[in-house]
């Protein structure tokens, strides 16, 4: 029995279509406005049959969609009747023959994103092309969009918290295939470097986060372009796009039954906060924990403290409207630094009779980082820093705090290895051991992506999921 595969690669890249530029242009001109499925390029390859079913122009599908669908069904029926098994049917959205998809482009800092027609190239060696179904807005996206504390790099396609389906894979990719459900991750796991081989680290030598890199590491080129001009990547993911190209080491294959509109938030914020508590701070049952910052990451950290059995979870935030919501995540007490005329570290030390056992900082404020460290109990207190500071910030504290056996640690992505650990975190959700639904407070269609930015800038809600098919 044979296998039918449907080829969606561009006409310029299909090895079966060795047209010259003039021939290709003539074909495109001839087929403009008509549905075209090129039967003459069916070719038997062993027991496989490659059917080239893409129209050459987007306009042909838009003008005659029913005819196009009818032709595809006819070919499917014919193949099945001949004893072939259908193993895949993947179109690159509506790029059709021209390689064009929709993406939200940040042209300059602080300006609304613009949904543009962008060409996305096929995956190269060790790369995967993913159809993004759901993505969500993380504070880090806003931070680099605003670009006040970092090096600006524009035009750029932001986005790094998402879920999707593998559309195609490049040379050398063996553990992923078209149809796999995946979470693209802003950091990676090559599985070969000393960090990846260590049980203690998740900071891959090859794929560690690089906010200044706007190209793929394989060849230093972008896979996105508009009229031949490159559009920069963001964190190797760029999920504010219908399709994106990601290094295979930054892709976690997950349970296909997991709802992507929920588990997409595990590809950054929720894993970062939850893991910072359970994997790094490691509070013991009955201990006290202070959480600095009650945004989505901070509440994920609070959830980790609750699951760990902390007896007191103290939430610290400048926005009192967050306090009621934080109760759903196990926070038992609240401190607004504005309500006191003394440093917040002193407030917490007095509240707890010497300091909290653990603290987790999730704001990126250097003052919050220092306070989180200085408010832990001497002798055994541990502070974990999660937030991303400005590039010129410096952490300053008196050395006696360290001599008094207070410990400060950093946590990167909750100390989770993307490919090895995240699938298991998804299973925790599937087994009802981890709640995610309460983190998702808003959803918007892709066409209204700027509304997600407005909500975050106004401090409303936790996570806004963006539906890419709308």
Image: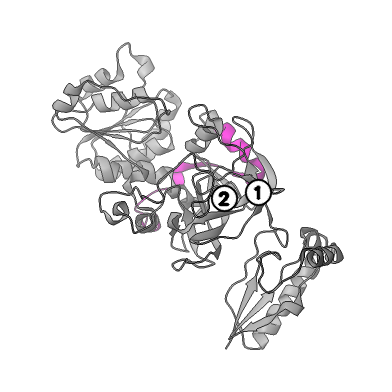
Q: CA distance from mark 1 to mark 2?
A: 10 Å
* Residue at point 38%, 37% (across, down): 299
444 part of magenta stretch: yes
The part of the chain drawn in magenta is 427-455
Displayed quadrant of residue 131: bottom right
Count of marks placed on residues: 2
Q: Quadrant of residue 167?
A: bottom right
Q: Position of residue 439 (x, y in %)?
A: 45, 42
Residue 292 appears in the figure: yes
Residue 405's label in the rendered image is none
Q: Nearer the viewer, residue 411 or 444?
A: 411
Q: Secondary structure at mark 1?
A: strand
Question: Which residue shows up at 30% across the image and 12% down it?
Answer: 342
* Image-based side of 251 in relation to 394, left or right: right
Q: Is residue 165 left or right of residue 61?
A: left
Q: Is residue 105 left or right of residue 169?
A: right
Q: Nearer the viewer, residue 273 or 369?
A: 369
Q: Position of residue 329 (x, y in %)?
A: 36, 39
| Residue placed under numbered mark 2 in the picture | 221
Counting other residues with Cα less than 10 Å from the Cα at mark 1, is it few (<14), some (14-19), or many (20 or more)? some
Q: Nearer the viewer, residue 118 or 253?
A: 118
Which residue in the protein does label 1 denote? 225
**Image coordinates for residue 46, horizontal then vertical, percent:** 58, 86
* Placement of the N terminus among the 4 image quadrants: bottom right
Asked if the stretch drawn in magenta spans residue 400, the answer is no
Residue 42 lies, with reference to residue 272, above or below; the image says below
Residue at 62% across / 52% down in the picture? 242
Answer whether residue 306 is visible to the viewer in this image: no
Q: Position of residue 227 (x, y in %)?
A: 72, 48
- Mark 1 or mark 2, which is nearer to you? 2
């Amino acid at each position: 029995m044979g296998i039918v595969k449907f080829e969606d690669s561009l006409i310029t890249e299909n090895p079966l279509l060795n047209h010259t530029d003039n021939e290709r242009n003539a074909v495109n001109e001839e087929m403009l406005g008509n549905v075209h499925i090129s039967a003459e390029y069916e070719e038997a390859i062993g027991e496989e049959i490659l059917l080239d079913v893409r129209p050459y122009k987007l306009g042909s599908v838009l003008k005659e969609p029913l005819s196009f669908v009818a032709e595809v069904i006819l070919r499917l029926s014919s193949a099945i009747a001949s004893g072939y098994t259908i193993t895949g049917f993947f179109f690159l959205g509506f790029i059709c023959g021209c390689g064009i998809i929709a993406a939200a482009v940040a042209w300059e800092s602080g300006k609304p994103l613009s949904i543009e027609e962008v060409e996305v190239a096929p995956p190269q060696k060790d790369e995967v092309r993913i159809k993004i179904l759901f993505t969500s807005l993380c504070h880090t996206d806003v931070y680099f969009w605003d670009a006040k504390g970092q090096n600006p790099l524009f035009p750029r396609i932001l986005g790094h918290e998402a879920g999707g389906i593998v559309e195609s894979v490049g040379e050398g990719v063996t553990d992923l295939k078209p149809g796999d459900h995946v979470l693209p991750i802003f950091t990676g796991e090559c599985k070969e470097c000393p960090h990846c081989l260590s049980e203690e680290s998740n900071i891959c030598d090859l794929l560690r986060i690089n906010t200044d890199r706007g190209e793929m590491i394989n060849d230093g080129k972008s896979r996105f372009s508009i009229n031949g001009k490159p559009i920069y990547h963001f964190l190797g993911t760029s999920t504010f796009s219908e399709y994106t190209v990601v290094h295979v080491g930054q892709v976690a294959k997950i349970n296909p039954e997991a709802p992507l509109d929920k588990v997409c938030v595990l590809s950054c914020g929720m894993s970062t906060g939850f893991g910072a508590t359970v994997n790094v701070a490691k509070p013991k049952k009955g201990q006290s924990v202070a959480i600095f910052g009650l945004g989505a990451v901070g509440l994920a950290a609070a959830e980790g403290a609750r699951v760990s059995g902390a007896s007191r979870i103290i939430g610290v935030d400048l926005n009192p409207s967050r306090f009621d919501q934080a109760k759903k995540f196990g926070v038992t007490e609240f401190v607004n630094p504005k309500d006191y005329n003394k440093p917040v570290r002193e407030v917490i030390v007095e509240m707890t009779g010497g300091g909290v056992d653990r603290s987790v900082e999730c704001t990126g404020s250097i003052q919050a980082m220092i306070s989180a460290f200085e408010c832990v109990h001497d002798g055994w207190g541990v502070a974990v820093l999660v937030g991303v500071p400005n590039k010129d910030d410096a952490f300053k504290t008196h050395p006696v705090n360290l001599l008094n056996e207070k410990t400060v640690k950093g946590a990167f992505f909750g100390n989770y290895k993307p490919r090895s650990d995240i699938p298991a975190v998804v299973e925790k959700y599937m087994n009802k051991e981890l709640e995610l639904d309460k983190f998702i407070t808003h959803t918007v269609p892709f066409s209204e992506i700027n509304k997600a930015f407005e909500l975050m800038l106004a401090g409303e809600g936790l996570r806004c999921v963006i539906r890419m098919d709308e």
